[in-house]
Image: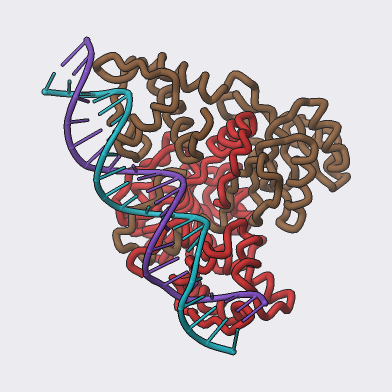
Chain colours: A brown, B red, C purple, D cyan
Amino acid sequence: MAGISDRTVGRLIRYHRLLDALAERGVSTVRSHELAQMVGATAAQVRRDLMAVEYSGRPMRGYGVTELMASLHGFLDEEAGKRAALVGVGNLGRAIIAYLSGRRPGLSIEATFDTDPAKFGASSDERVCFPLSQLAPVVRERRINVGIITVPAAAAQSVGQALADAGVRGIVNFAPVSLHVAPDVHVEYIDMTISLEKAAFFASHAHTQHGTGPH
Amino acid sequence: MAGISDRTVGRLIRYHRLLDALAERGVSTVRSHELAQMVGATAAQVRRDLMAVEYSGRPMRGYGVTELMASLHGFLDEEAGKRAALVGVGNLGRAIIAYLSGRRPGLSIEATFDTDPAKFGASSDERVCFPLSQLAPVVRERRINVGIITVPAAAAQSVGQALADAGVRGIVNFAPVSLHVAPDVHVEYIDMTISLEKAAFFASHAHTQHGTGPH
DNA sequence: TCTTGTGAACAAATTCACAGCG
DNA sequence: CGCTGTGAATTTGTTCACAAGA
């Protein structure tokens, strides 16, 4: 548990999601190479990743879907409800709220923040929107552990700092800037413009350049 | 040009963006360690990355902002207008259109597609929305080279395939599934639920686990 | 004295390849 | 057999550390 790589965690989450779908379809067993092709990786990669989780159990014709899923579930401790706050209730922020609402739970947006007084009170999706100044107390009171930043680039750093100060240790940043926060705060970057530019770049320079593995 | 890593391209794009901001502010020169701290990397990393671009020019107190910017601009051939199509005009799709509209050009969304007839014709932002069946001809006619997938997971694979068949070589996929396409089609994945889960995971397992470098 | 470019060392991630088990 | 788990090899990515330029 000490050193598990970022990449591996990402894939474990994907395996977990796939297993969920398989279970739904009544599949009871799955081989490493099947999982591999579903996520676009190699069988060895899958097996290596799974070494990280408890379930070393390996019957003989693959992995037991429900068992492995349970192990992953435990490992990723999805039990602990992920309580998120979203800062920046603009177009993007609202779309994300809507997008996440349609998903299988595990993560709930407990509060939203903005600086525009017009947005305060019952806003998007009946969720209350607080003034940014209330961030620290609300975060603490609602035991929020994940922050989502959807403010303009210029405001992102200070929002990130505020979240970190309020005790949030995991942040997903949609603003196109790097965040400067304490090293124990984990930041995931989602930068659409960069993804778009990368796609465009490799589109033209397609020397049979393999696409990036899922992420 | 032959083998430039995905990671490096991502950072080059970031440097380019930063230089743009610096130029705006009238800064004329910048050192590797400055760029480094701005993107959250090391100075050596920056220098290594820049080896990929033409501009080996290195006066003596850093890089000339405009010169380096020009080189990056050329390297990333931002000249060739990036013409994108967005498939799936739902909440997320619309938000992305709005988000990108507010950005410095270089990429324009030339067409949108959906299967819902109610959306056809002048839709989001005065852009025309075509029926999905028209994808191939419209993509070719408008010389679109980047596809953005914002359809539900179940439809993503077939849309990706359709885009690839129509000649699109760069895709940004927001649907939470891996795309199975020819190896010369580059796919960038943006999966919010995974980013959120990762953030949550590392938030609790914060063994001073360093955050992922920007991406 | 700074700061770059880069060979060489290092670290991380992935794949190979094979022993072991049912 | 076909499958997993895993040491060892390999490949990929990052950092070190230093020669050279101004």
Q: Quadrant of the N terminus of chain B?
A: bottom left
Can residue B124 be spotted in the picture? yes
Residue A163 appears left or right of B140 = right
Looking at the image, is B46 positioned above or below residue B196? below
Residue A142 picture quarter: top right
Residue B80 visible in rendering: no
Give the side of residue B83 with respect to residue A128, left or right. Answer: left
Q: Quadrant of residue B146?
A: bottom left
Residue placed at 83% from the left, 31% from the top?
A: A138
Residue A163: percent from left, percent from top: 76, 40
Choose between A196 and B166: the one closer to the eye.
Answer: A196
User: How many numbered dots are placed on residues in this image?
Assistant: 0
Q: Nearer the viewer, residue B16 or B95?
A: B16
Q: Residue at x 83, y 36 (%)?
A: A136
The x and y percentages for residue A189 are 59, 48
- When the figure is inspected, residue A108 is found, relative to residue B60, above or below; the finding is above
- Depth check: give the residue in front, B130 or A106: A106
| Residue A143 at x, y percent in the picture | 76, 26
- What percent of the width, then of the height, locates residue B171? 43, 53
Give the answer, above or below, for where B95 lies relative to A70. below
Residue located 29% across and 14% down the image: A59
